[in-house]
Image (cartoon, rainbow, N blue to C red):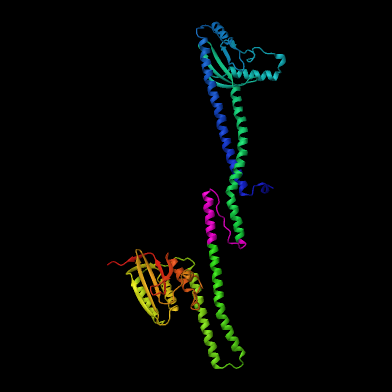
Amino acid sequence: MVERLRPSGLRARLSIAIAAILAAAVGATFLVIYRGTGSTLRAGVDTELREEGQAFAHGLRGAKDPDALAAAGRRYVRSQRFGPSARLLVLALSDGRIATNDPELLGLQRDLDRESSQVQRREDEQIRGLLATPPGFSTVRLEDTGAVRVITRPVEGAGVLRVGEPLASVARAQEGVARAFFVAGSLTLVAALAAGYVVAARTTDPLRRMARTAARIDAGELSHRIGPTGPSEEIRTLAESFDHMLDRLDDAFARQREFVADASHELRTPLTVIRGQLEVLARSGDPSAEDVRRVESLVATEVARMQRLVDDLLLLASAEEGAPPRLKPVDVRRFLTEQLGGIEATADRRFALGTVADGTVLADPDGLAQAIRNLIRNAVEHTAVGGSVSLSAVARGDRIEFAVEDDGPGIPFAQRERVFQRLYRAPPSGAGGSGLGLAIARAIIEAHAGRIWADEAGTGGARVAFELPRFAAARA
């Protein structure tokens, strides 16, 4: 039962917590003001009693014997009657005589028929307590008056004077403070609950939106985002981090879908060829050795094509994962010479090494080699036998620009951005290669914080260039 009554929602708990904190603050403030009011008023009463006691003692000055002292005391106390706005004056002589401005209060004039014996005994005890107060300030309680603050002073001669004032005004002031705080505190708590609910609602609304977004994502809808969340910097930072995480997840799933789609699309053609050739061979009752060798050659060619395609797709997927490259100093001239020398024997083309800046660049040697080889292969595929392919590297301050140029048909202006898309083959020679070479090169270059583009070579063919940072020119 207790568990059911506990607020389960964060909004309710925040509202109750804010109201509880405010109630504690109001309660502490009430105690401080309530007690401070009482202390201040009692201090004022003590000051007035001290002054009244001094005036009472001054009125008795000059009386030398008990009779004169009693007469002077009666004259002084007769001048003011004890009541709600007056003070109690008592002169008690050592011979037992008492002069006071309220004889009834001290039992000197009492209506015994109208008071019970129990009340009389209680009043007698209170009067004895009043007449026995020590020198200084004391607080006594009387039956009809309530709490009375009393100052006691000895009188030169034979007696003690006492001046008392009821503390009813102090009690009334404290009751007024209590009533004001009760009314103000009640209104404040109601306002605090309402404000707490609004604040809690504004605080928890982004969290609820996150929960709804997470539920939709769990259902497979990766396009949902939390978006702007209001003025709270912490919640806004959390929402931005959450949206950034969703962007990365969406991008990762998109790359995964693209990889599967690309692999299935490109593998379908060689698999269809292999299947068709095997079916033709199977329909022949007694295939000749020539037919078997022909089918074997076609199947081997298509298997090799599939192997290259799978390798390229895996390399592209690895490059697009965003893993930081392993940077090492690479000597530009030596590196380009090695790359050009390694590919010259694989194609019947005229290869040339153009302008090369002397210096080193911080790069991943394997990734950089893969990018340059892909650009050279792309140039070879789009040039005729005996065509020219050149490789150069020009310094641009602390950056270096690599370029591969050929004398082929070139790349139309409208297609110079699309050629870097995976599986795109630019016409008119769209049948060559897997369509992944330039896409892999772009992924490698962008991982190095560089950029890659295509334009027209001076020979009229294609020019594919990329720029890398962190280049240091060689000292003369």
Residue 135 in view in this figure: no
Residue toward you, 197 or 66? 197
Eyeballing the image, is 342 above or below 216?
below
**Image quadrant in which you'd find residue 104:** top right
Q: Is residue 57 left or right of residue 285?
A: left
Q: Is residue 443 above or below residue 303?
A: above
Residue at 59%, 25% (x, y): give it: 173
Residue in the image at 58% along x and 59% along y: 224
Q: Determine the residue positioned at 54% across, 54% down.
A: 239
- At a point 53% along the width and 48% down the height, the residue shown is 232
Q: Is residue 58 left or right of residue 4?
A: left
Q: Which residues are magenta?
A: 218-247
For residue 447, side relative to residue 212 (left or right): left
Query: Does residue 75 appear in the picture of this structure?
Result: yes
Depth check: give the residue in front, 346 or 203: 346
> Percent from the top left, x then y, of residue 220?
61, 63
Residue 47 is covered by the magenta coloring: no
Q: How many marks?
A: 0
Estimate the x, y position of residue 129 in percent, counting from the top left.
60, 19
- In the image, residue 329 above or below residue 267: above
243 part of magenta stretch:
yes
Is residue 376 depicted above or below 81 in this figure? below
Instruction: In this rendered view, identify the residue nearer to me: 367 or 404.
Output: 404
Residue positioned most to the right: 113
User: Which quarter of the rendered picture does the C terminus lie within?
Assistant: bottom left
Give percent across and percent down for residue 172. 61, 25
Q: Quadrant of residue 74?
A: top right
